[in-house]
Image (tube, rainbow, N blue to C red):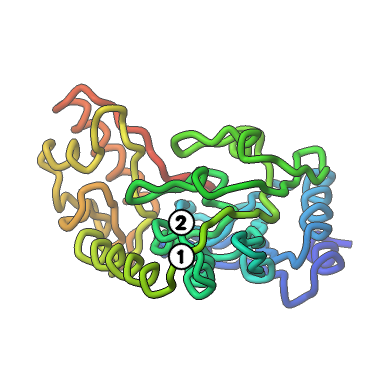
Amino acid sequence: MNLYNELCSIARDENVLRDEPMSAHTTFRIGGPADYLVMPENTEEIRQITELCEARKVPHYVIGNGSNLLVGDRGYRGVIIQVQKNMNNIRIEGTRIRAQAGALLAKTASAACQAGLSGMEFASGIPGTLGGAIRMNAGAYGGEMKQILRSASVLTSEGDVAELSVEEMKLGYRTSIIAKMDYVVLEAVLDLREGKTEEIRAKMEKLKEKRVSKQPLEYGSAGSTFKRPEGYFAGKLIEDAGLRGFRIGNAQVSEKHCGFVINLGGASAAEVVELMAEVVRRVEENSGVRLEPEVKKIGEF
């Protein structure tokens, strides 16, 4: 069988897409076609797809909502495994939430709010999935995933399912053992606390207003483009280098928030890469600080 038929034999035909434009699967709204995009429905399908790719020596990459991702203009030669559409169940268990890796943070935070559970308000506006958020210990407004995470079920590179405690995940600033070992998050348990739905909703609305007023949400982006250098703020360093509004083609340093590189419409991955490189160069020239990208690049540029 060819690879397409083999993938369809693992996942249902409707869950296997050929020559799928990645611009439709990233918040940057940029990216050429992936040879195959597969949307598994369970752990066993992820395991079998991964094993197939490794046996065939086919490159493969797991994504969630594509919120921290820049895919090359020439696309991705191989298989993209999207853990979102079919693995996004959310269950309330007392003061805990058990959710699959593909559950969007916004929906998980909303479910927590409706159940009168507090602690996840900070994540309500982060545009990623639970799995991606755990992998990079996502955070905002003083909160981060390690504060509310109890445990996670992961698929190891050996194909085994392991249960990791929050301590075992070694969550740090935008990193974890999951990222370092290239594990795939399958499901997680969040520890929250009882609260009043009205107060939780009010806090979420307040953070939303702050986000809308300070972040360029109307444009495609991957969120914060660069990691926060110790002792500095990336956006301030970029602004101090005179780069507010700086653009190459349709890629631009946001005028609203210099920490964001945005897609004005029709920007190419090449333009984003060139812009990011120029930002890194000028910031280092101006301040002596070398910025590190937070955005992950995959595919052919």
Number of other residues with Cα within 10 Å of mark 1, as a class: few under 14, some 14 to 19, many 20 or more: some
| Towards the viewer: 300 or 168 | 168
Q: Is residue 111 left or right of residue 37?
A: left
Q: Is residue 80 left or right of residue 263?
A: right
| Towards the viewer: 13 or 19 | 13
For the N terminus, give its image quadrant. Answer: bottom right
Q: Residue at x 65, y 39 (%)?
A: 182
| Towards the viewer: 95 or 279 | 95
Q: Position of residue 167 (x, y in %)?
A: 62, 34
Of the residues shown, which amino acid type is indicated by label 1? Gly
Q: Position of residue 290 (x, y in %)?
A: 29, 27
Is residue 66 visible to us here? yes
Q: Which mark is residue 33?
A: none
Q: Is residue 183 left or right of residue 262?
A: right
Q: Residue at x 52, y 51 (%)?
A: 133
Q: Position of residue 35 (x, y in %)?
A: 65, 60
- Residue bearing mark 1: 195
Q: Position of residue 22 (x, y in %)?
A: 52, 63
Q: Residue at x 26, y 47 (%)?
A: 259
> Tags 1 and 2 in contact by the CB under 8 Å rule?
yes
Residue 144 vertical position relative to residue 2 in the rendered view, above or below: above
Of the residues shown, which amino acid type is indicated by label 2? Gly
Q: Residue at x 30, y 67 (%)?
A: 208
Q: Which mark is residue 119?
A: 2
Residue 292 vertical position relative to residue 25 in the rendered view, above or below: above
